[in-house]
Image (cartoon, coloured by chain):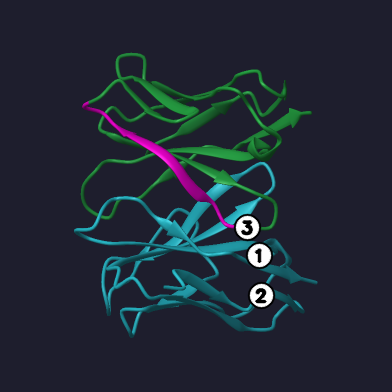
Chain colours: A cyan, B green
Amino acid sequence: NAGVTQTPKFRVLKTGQSMTLLCAQDMNHEYMYWYRQDPGMGLRLIHYSVGEGTTAKGEVPDGYNVSRLKKQNFLLGLESAAPSQTSVYFCASRGHTTGIEQYFGPGTRLTVT
Amino acid sequence: GENVEQHPSTLSVQEGDSAVIKCTYSDSASNYFPWYKQELGKGPQLIIDIRSNVGEKKDQRIAVTLNKTAKHFSLHITETQPEDSAVYFCAASAFYGNNRLAFGKGNQVVVIP
């Protein structure tokens, strides 16, 4: 099992550009989450999904959109990137009946200039 | 919503000594308290967790204690080793529904050889 994987690992965008971050998990987990991590801020929840075809807003959803068309994938989109979205983005997943712990991916470091 | 605070922000200990990190939470409905370790350039990894029906849990050199009345929980690392150097995050959530974790801002632990 690869666990939770994220693509890409690094990316530099210019203000106004768009991009999609991909999260994939091979553990058949129902729940998936997108967090951002900023220095001194801990991890903040952007959006999450409780199952295929469903998404919900987290703590800091503005400027991001998500989709969960397949159970194993959770996409995070930035339609018009801003310097305030410079951050490290982590995806996590969790099973519904297999336990409560969330498993994290390795992260994507995004810089918006 | 839930608010989790961690203290101290940075902790330096001599190798072999113990390290203690304390977190407080605000929502009395929270009943699940995980601790994550994050090494440089990696995603957070669950190291231990505790549920509100127990007061203490141990796993080798790591232990977590929970005081529901005071709404605080602590991570204890004994016989620290250089590989314990990392950022540690505490979190809290209610063990039902979407398991939205509220994270603390993290503690940098430095073990001095």
- Mark 2 is surrounded, within 10 Å at the Cα level, by few (under 14), some (14 to 19) or many (20 or more) other residues, namely many
* A44 drawn magenta: no
Q: Nearer the viewer, residue B17 or B6?
A: B17
Q: CA distance from mark 1 to mark 2?
A: 7 Å
Choose top left, top right, bottom left or bottom right for residue A74: bottom left
Q: Which mark is residue B48?
A: none
* Range of residues picked out in magenta: B43-53
Q: Are discs 1 and 2 less than 8 Å apart at CB?
A: yes
* Chain letter belonging to callout 3: B
Callout 3 and callout 1 share a chain: no
Q: Which residue is mark 1?
A: A85
From the image, state whether disc 3 or disc 2 is nearer to you: 3
Q: Residue at x 70, y 80 (%)?
A: A16
Residue annotated with mark 3: B42
Amino acid at dot 1: Gln
For image coordinates 57% across by 57% down, the residue present is B43
Q: Secondary structure at mark 3?
A: loop
Give the numbered dot on residue A81: 2
